[in-house]
Amino acid sequence: MDLGLKGKTALVTGASQGIGKGVALALAREGARVMVTARNAERLEALVEEIRAAGGEAAYFAGDLSAPETVDALYQATLERFGPVEVLLGNTGGPAPGPAEALEEAAWREAAELLFYPMVRLVRRVLPEMKARQWGRILFITSLSVKEPIPNLALSNALRAAVTGFAKTLSTEVAPYGITVNCLGPGYTRTERLVHLFEDRAQRQGIPVEEAYRAQEAQIPMRRLARVEEIADVAAFLLSERASYVTGQTLVVDGGATHALL
Ligand code: NAD
Protein backbone atom coordinates (compact mmCIF):
# COMPACT_ATOMS: atom_id res chain seq x y z
CA MET A 1 0.00 0.00 0.00
CA ASP A 2 1.35 3.43 -0.92
CA LEU A 3 0.80 5.60 2.17
CA GLY A 4 0.75 8.78 0.10
CA LEU A 5 3.50 10.44 2.13
CA LYS A 6 5.97 11.11 -0.68
CA GLY A 7 7.32 14.66 -0.51
CA LYS A 8 5.30 15.56 2.60
CA THR A 9 7.05 17.59 5.28
CA ALA A 10 7.05 15.74 8.61
CA LEU A 11 8.16 16.96 12.02
CA VAL A 12 9.01 14.22 14.54
CA THR A 13 9.82 15.15 18.13
CA GLY A 14 11.60 12.97 20.69
CA ALA A 15 13.34 11.39 17.72
CA SER A 16 16.86 10.69 18.98
CA GLN A 17 15.94 7.19 20.16
CA GLY A 18 13.11 4.75 20.78
CA ILE A 19 9.64 5.18 19.32
CA GLY A 20 10.23 8.68 17.92
CA LYS A 21 13.30 7.50 16.03
CA GLY A 22 11.36 4.51 14.71
CA VAL A 23 8.58 6.77 13.41
CA ALA A 24 11.11 9.10 11.75
CA LEU A 25 12.68 6.13 9.93
CA ALA A 26 9.28 4.80 8.88
CA LEU A 27 8.12 8.17 7.51
CA ALA A 28 11.42 8.70 5.68
CA ARG A 29 11.11 5.24 4.10
CA GLU A 30 7.72 6.33 2.78
CA GLY A 31 9.32 9.34 1.09
CA ALA A 32 8.48 12.09 3.61
CA ARG A 33 11.04 14.84 4.24
CA VAL A 34 11.63 14.55 7.95
CA MET A 35 12.77 17.13 10.49
CA VAL A 36 13.86 15.27 13.62
CA THR A 37 14.30 16.87 17.00
CA ALA A 38 15.34 16.01 20.57
CA ARG A 39 18.05 17.30 22.90
CA ASN A 40 21.01 15.18 21.78
CA ALA A 41 22.56 16.63 18.60
CA GLU A 42 25.01 13.74 18.11
CA ARG A 43 22.29 11.11 18.06
CA LEU A 44 20.14 13.24 15.76
CA GLU A 45 23.04 13.71 13.37
CA ALA A 46 23.55 9.94 13.27
CA LEU A 47 19.83 9.43 12.55
CA VAL A 48 19.90 11.97 9.72
CA GLU A 49 22.92 10.16 8.25
CA GLU A 50 21.08 6.84 8.51
CA ILE A 51 18.05 8.26 6.69
CA ARG A 52 20.17 9.85 3.96
CA ALA A 53 22.22 6.67 3.50
CA ALA A 54 18.95 4.85 2.80
CA GLY A 55 18.04 7.45 0.15
CA GLY A 56 15.71 9.54 2.33
CA GLU A 57 15.62 13.25 3.14
CA ALA A 58 16.07 14.54 6.70
CA ALA A 59 17.48 17.34 8.83
CA TYR A 60 17.72 17.85 12.58
CA PHE A 61 17.20 20.54 15.19
CA ALA A 62 18.50 19.99 18.72
CA GLY A 63 16.71 21.57 21.68
CA ASP A 64 14.77 21.05 24.90
CA LEU A 65 11.07 20.91 24.01
CA SER A 66 10.06 21.96 27.53
CA ALA A 67 11.19 25.48 26.66
CA PRO A 68 8.54 27.46 24.71
CA GLU A 69 11.23 29.20 22.63
CA THR A 70 12.48 25.81 21.37
CA VAL A 71 9.15 25.16 19.69
CA ASP A 72 9.27 28.53 17.92
CA ALA A 73 12.87 28.03 16.72
CA LEU A 74 12.14 24.44 15.68
CA TYR A 75 9.11 25.49 13.67
CA GLN A 76 11.10 28.24 11.93
CA ALA A 77 13.97 25.87 11.13
CA THR A 78 11.55 23.33 9.63
CA LEU A 79 9.82 26.00 7.58
CA GLU A 80 13.12 27.26 6.16
CA ARG A 81 14.41 23.78 5.39
CA PHE A 82 11.37 21.87 4.14
CA GLY A 83 8.41 24.29 4.11
CA PRO A 84 5.23 24.13 6.25
CA VAL A 85 4.72 21.07 8.47
CA GLU A 86 2.09 18.72 7.03
CA VAL A 87 2.66 15.75 9.34
CA LEU A 88 3.35 16.10 13.08
CA LEU A 89 4.39 13.37 15.50
CA GLY A 90 4.28 14.79 19.06
CA ASN A 91 6.40 12.73 21.44
CA THR A 92 8.81 13.21 24.35
CA GLY A 93 10.12 11.06 27.20
CA GLY A 94 8.17 9.57 30.09
CA PRO A 95 8.03 11.43 33.46
CA ALA A 96 9.35 10.16 36.78
CA PRO A 97 7.33 7.54 38.70
CA GLY A 98 5.51 8.32 41.95
CA PRO A 99 2.12 8.06 43.70
CA ALA A 100 -0.55 10.74 43.19
CA GLU A 101 -0.66 11.73 46.86
CA ALA A 102 3.02 12.43 47.48
CA LEU A 103 4.14 14.35 44.41
CA GLU A 104 5.14 17.98 44.90
CA GLU A 105 3.57 20.70 42.77
CA ALA A 106 6.93 21.29 41.05
CA ALA A 107 6.89 17.70 39.78
CA TRP A 108 3.42 18.20 38.30
CA ARG A 109 4.55 21.39 36.56
CA GLU A 110 7.67 19.72 35.21
CA ALA A 111 5.68 16.78 33.84
CA ALA A 112 3.18 19.14 32.20
CA GLU A 113 6.09 21.04 30.61
CA LEU A 114 7.42 17.76 29.22
CA LEU A 115 4.26 15.95 28.13
CA PHE A 116 1.47 18.48 27.66
CA TYR A 117 2.53 22.05 26.85
CA PRO A 118 4.95 21.14 24.04
CA MET A 119 2.05 19.42 22.24
CA VAL A 120 -0.19 22.49 22.61
CA ARG A 121 2.61 24.79 21.43
CA LEU A 122 3.50 22.58 18.45
CA VAL A 123 -0.13 22.46 17.37
CA ARG A 124 -0.53 26.24 17.59
CA ARG A 125 2.45 26.56 15.27
CA VAL A 126 1.55 23.98 12.63
CA LEU A 127 -2.23 24.48 12.44
CA PRO A 128 -2.50 27.74 10.48
CA GLU A 129 -0.62 26.28 7.46
CA MET A 130 -2.43 22.94 7.71
CA LYS A 131 -5.78 24.76 7.67
CA ALA A 132 -4.70 26.92 4.73
CA ARG A 133 -3.71 23.78 2.79
CA GLN A 134 -6.81 21.83 3.91
CA TRP A 135 -4.65 18.84 4.84
CA GLY A 136 -2.76 17.77 7.93
CA ARG A 137 -1.91 14.81 10.15
CA ILE A 138 -1.26 15.09 13.89
CA LEU A 139 -0.45 12.14 16.14
CA PHE A 140 0.56 12.14 19.79
CA ILE A 141 2.37 9.27 21.47
CA THR A 142 0.68 8.59 24.81
CA SER A 143 0.59 5.21 26.57
CA LEU A 144 -1.53 2.14 27.22
CA SER A 145 -2.12 3.84 30.60
CA VAL A 146 -4.90 5.94 29.01
CA LYS A 147 -6.99 2.74 29.00
CA GLU A 148 -5.74 1.34 32.31
CA PRO A 149 -3.79 3.71 34.56
CA ILE A 150 -0.57 2.14 35.87
CA PRO A 151 -0.04 2.15 39.67
CA ASN A 152 2.68 4.53 40.90
CA LEU A 153 2.80 6.43 37.57
CA ALA A 154 0.54 9.32 38.62
CA LEU A 155 2.26 11.94 36.46
CA SER A 156 2.09 9.83 33.33
CA ASN A 157 -1.49 8.67 33.99
CA ALA A 158 -2.74 12.24 34.50
CA LEU A 159 -0.81 14.01 31.75
CA ARG A 160 -1.51 11.37 29.06
CA ALA A 161 -5.19 11.86 29.85
CA ALA A 162 -4.74 15.61 29.35
CA VAL A 163 -3.11 15.06 25.95
CA THR A 164 -5.92 12.67 24.99
CA GLY A 165 -8.58 15.23 25.94
CA PHE A 166 -6.75 17.95 24.04
CA ALA A 167 -6.43 15.73 20.95
CA LYS A 168 -10.09 14.69 21.01
CA THR A 169 -11.37 18.26 21.33
CA LEU A 170 -8.99 19.53 18.68
CA SER A 171 -9.92 16.73 16.28
CA THR A 172 -13.53 17.93 16.04
CA GLU A 173 -12.44 21.55 15.57
CA VAL A 174 -10.07 20.88 12.67
CA ALA A 175 -11.82 17.96 10.93
CA PRO A 176 -13.58 20.31 8.46
CA TYR A 177 -10.11 21.32 7.21
CA GLY A 178 -9.03 17.78 6.30
CA ILE A 179 -6.81 17.55 9.37
CA THR A 180 -6.83 14.42 11.53
CA VAL A 181 -5.73 14.30 15.18
CA ASN A 182 -5.13 10.97 16.91
CA CYS A 183 -3.17 9.34 19.73
CA LEU A 184 -1.18 6.13 19.74
CA GLY A 185 -0.76 4.43 23.10
CA PRO A 186 2.21 2.07 23.01
CA GLY A 187 2.35 -0.99 25.19
CA TYR A 188 5.62 -2.30 26.60
CA THR A 189 8.11 -1.64 23.81
CA ARG A 190 11.79 -2.60 23.71
CA THR A 191 13.33 0.86 23.64
CA GLU A 192 16.51 1.95 25.42
CA ARG A 193 14.38 3.54 28.10
CA LEU A 194 12.56 0.30 28.79
CA VAL A 195 15.83 -1.65 28.88
CA HIS A 196 17.03 0.74 31.62
CA LEU A 197 13.75 0.37 33.51
CA PHE A 198 14.05 -3.41 33.46
CA GLU A 199 17.70 -3.34 34.52
CA ASP A 200 16.67 -1.12 37.40
CA ARG A 201 13.73 -3.36 38.33
CA ALA A 202 15.93 -6.49 38.21
CA GLN A 203 18.53 -4.89 40.43
CA ARG A 204 15.94 -3.78 43.01
CA GLN A 205 14.32 -7.22 43.08
CA GLY A 206 17.69 -9.04 43.05
CA ILE A 207 16.76 -11.09 39.98
CA PRO A 208 18.45 -11.54 36.56
CA VAL A 209 17.24 -8.97 34.01
CA GLU A 210 15.92 -11.73 31.73
CA GLU A 211 13.65 -12.85 34.58
CA ALA A 212 12.30 -9.30 34.89
CA TYR A 213 11.44 -9.36 31.18
CA ARG A 214 9.81 -12.78 31.49
CA ALA A 215 7.62 -11.59 34.37
CA GLN A 216 6.37 -8.67 32.26
CA GLU A 217 5.94 -10.76 29.14
CA ALA A 218 3.83 -13.28 31.04
CA GLN A 219 1.26 -10.48 31.62
CA ILE A 220 0.93 -9.77 27.89
CA PRO A 221 -1.33 -12.06 25.83
CA MET A 222 1.26 -12.06 23.00
CA ARG A 223 3.88 -13.09 25.59
CA ARG A 224 6.46 -10.63 24.34
CA LEU A 225 7.31 -6.93 24.28
CA ALA A 226 6.72 -4.85 21.15
CA ARG A 227 9.49 -4.08 18.70
CA VAL A 228 9.82 -0.35 17.95
CA GLU A 229 8.95 -1.02 14.29
CA GLU A 230 5.60 -2.51 15.34
CA ILE A 231 4.66 0.81 16.94
CA ALA A 232 6.26 2.95 14.24
CA ASP A 233 4.47 1.28 11.33
CA VAL A 234 1.07 1.90 12.93
CA ALA A 235 2.08 5.51 13.59
CA ALA A 236 3.15 5.97 9.96
CA PHE A 237 -0.23 4.67 8.81
CA LEU A 238 -2.15 7.01 11.14
CA LEU A 239 -0.03 9.90 9.83
CA SER A 240 -0.65 8.99 6.21
CA GLU A 241 -3.08 9.88 3.46
CA ARG A 242 -4.54 6.36 3.78
CA ALA A 243 -5.87 7.07 7.32
CA SER A 244 -7.91 10.03 6.03
CA TYR A 245 -11.16 9.11 7.88
CA VAL A 246 -9.57 8.19 11.23
CA THR A 247 -9.71 11.06 13.69
CA GLY A 248 -10.25 11.70 17.39
CA GLN A 249 -9.11 8.16 18.21
CA THR A 250 -6.62 6.52 20.52
CA LEU A 251 -5.14 3.33 19.16
CA VAL A 252 -3.44 1.24 21.81
CA VAL A 253 -0.76 -1.04 20.34
CA ASP A 254 0.04 -3.37 23.21
CA GLY A 255 -0.12 -7.01 22.15
CA GLY A 256 -3.44 -7.30 23.99
CA ALA A 257 -2.10 -6.13 27.36
CA THR A 258 -5.00 -3.85 28.32
CA HIS A 259 -8.24 -5.49 29.33
CA ALA A 260 -10.61 -2.60 28.57
CA LEU A 261 -13.43 -3.40 26.13
CA LEU A 262 -12.90 -0.22 24.03
P1 NAD B 1 12.70 7.26 25.10
O1 NAD B 1 13.03 7.81 26.44
O2 NAD B 1 13.52 6.13 24.57
O3 NAD B 1 12.74 8.43 24.03
C1 NAD B 1 12.19 9.69 24.31
C2 NAD B 1 12.66 10.71 23.29
O4 NAD B 1 12.20 12.00 23.70
C3 NAD B 1 14.18 10.79 23.19
O5 NAD B 1 14.53 11.12 21.88
C4 NAD B 1 14.49 11.97 24.12
O6 NAD B 1 15.71 12.60 23.83
C5 NAD B 1 13.31 12.88 23.82
N1 NAD B 1 13.06 13.84 24.89
C6 NAD B 1 12.84 13.57 26.20
N2 NAD B 1 12.68 14.72 26.87
C7 NAD B 1 12.82 15.73 25.97
C8 NAD B 1 12.79 17.14 26.06
N3 NAD B 1 12.56 17.76 27.21
N4 NAD B 1 12.98 17.87 24.95
C9 NAD B 1 13.21 17.25 23.76
N5 NAD B 1 13.26 15.91 23.61
C10 NAD B 1 13.07 15.18 24.71
O7 NAD B 1 11.17 6.86 25.17
P2 NAD B 1 10.36 5.80 24.32
O8 NAD B 1 10.45 4.49 25.01
O9 NAD B 1 10.69 5.90 22.88
O10 NAD B 1 8.87 6.33 24.57
C11 NAD B 1 8.33 7.44 23.90
C12 NAD B 1 7.08 7.87 24.64
O11 NAD B 1 6.18 6.76 24.72
C13 NAD B 1 7.37 8.32 26.08
O12 NAD B 1 6.49 9.34 26.44
C14 NAD B 1 7.06 7.05 26.86
O13 NAD B 1 6.76 7.32 28.20
C15 NAD B 1 5.88 6.52 26.08
N6 NAD B 1 5.67 5.10 26.30
C16 NAD B 1 6.69 4.22 26.10
C17 NAD B 1 6.49 2.87 26.35
C18 NAD B 1 7.61 1.85 26.18
O14 NAD B 1 7.42 0.72 26.57
N7 NAD B 1 8.73 2.22 25.59
C19 NAD B 1 5.24 2.42 26.80
C20 NAD B 1 4.20 3.34 26.97
C21 NAD B 1 4.44 4.68 26.72
Image: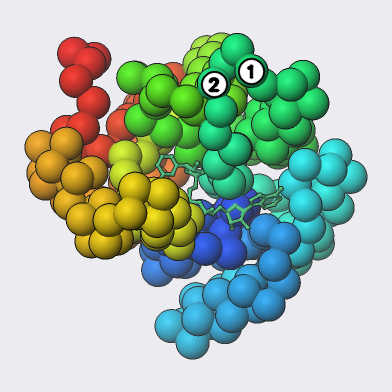
Vertical arrangement, residue 157 with respect to residue 38, above or below:
above
The residue sitting at the bottom extreme is 53
Measuring from the top left, give residue 256's x and y in whole percent.
17, 33
- Residue 201 or residue 140, whichever sits in front: 201
> From the Cβ of disc 1, is ligand 1 less than 8 Å away?
no
* Quadrant housing residue 176: top right
Quarter of the picture containing the N terminus is: bottom left
Q: Which residue is mark 2?
A: 99
Query: Residue shown at 62%/74% (left/top)?
Result: 43
Q: CA distance from mark 2 to mark 1?
A: 6 Å
Query: Residue shown at 25%/38% (left/top)?
Result: 254
Residue at disc 1, secondary structure: loop
Q: CB atoms at circles 2 and 1 under 8 Å apart?
A: yes
- Residue 160 or residue 149, whichever sits in front: 149
* Quadrant housing residue 260: top left
Which amino acid does the dot numbered 1 rest on?
Ala
Q: Which residue is mark 1?
A: 102
Measuring from the top left, give residue 145's x and y in whole percent.
39, 26
Which amino acid does the dot numbered 2 rest on?
Pro
Horizontally, residue 6 falls left or right of residue 71, namely: left
Vertical arrangement, residue 122 with respect to residue 21, above or below:
above
